[in-house]
Image (spheres, rainbow, N blue to C red):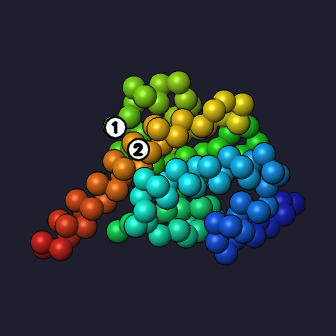
Amino acid sequence: MKAKRVTPNDIDEYIAAFSSDIKERLEAIRTTIKKAAPLAEERISYQIPTFALHGNLVHFAAFTKHIGFYPGAAGVKAFTKELAAFETGKGSVQLPLDKPIPHALLTRIVKFRVQQNLRKAAARRKK
């Protein structure tokens, strides 16, 4: 029988549940996202850390061998060449724990997602 996973109340609580080396990486990613999207709101969505601005921007989560970064399908597709060194899925990127975090790339992806969400929000207001 699987143990029931407890949903954290906020990103601080999520990060606190990990070992110090993982906490450090998660905080570094969080800081990178905050700098790239200073107006984004932190929340927990899908039981993982999420930044939102007119809808979800990006999510991230720790796993045994990687940190998952989730910029959505458009975020992955727009940076296909730059993400070639990483395992990716339709809307996900695996950042291995044994490699440096590509902060500059994450910054560009988050800024791309901010612009995408702002355009969508403006289009909704025009309707």
Give the spatial CA distance, label 1 vs label 2: 8 Å
On screen, residue 101 above or below 124: above
Identify the image quadrant of residue 81: top left
Q: Disc 2 residue type?
A: Ile
Q: What residue is shown at x 72% (from left), y 31% (from top)?
A: 98
Q: What residue is shown at x 45% (from left), y 37% (from top)?
A: 105
**Which residue has dot 1 on it?**
78
User: Element under label 1?
Assistant: loop
Percent x, y of residue 38:
43, 62
Percent x, y of residue 116:
29, 54
Percent x, y of residue 59:
53, 56
Asked whether 95 or 5 is in front, the reply is 95
Q: Is residue 22 left or right of residue 122?
A: right
| Quadrant (top left, top right, bottom left, bottom right) of the C terminus | bottom left
Is label 1 in contact with label 2 (beta carbons under 8 Å)?
yes
Asked whether 38 or 120 is in front, the reply is 38
Q: Could one spot residue 89 in this view of the protein?
A: no
| Quadrant (top left, top right, bottom left, bottom right) of the N terminus | bottom right
Asked whether 101 or 80 is in front, the reply is 101
Q: Could one spot residue 22 in this view of the protein?
A: yes
Query: Which label number is shown at residue 109?
Result: 2
Mark 2 neighbour class, 10 Å CA radius: few under 14, some 14 to 19, many 20 or more:
many
Sequence-wise, the earlier of marks 1 and 2 is: 1
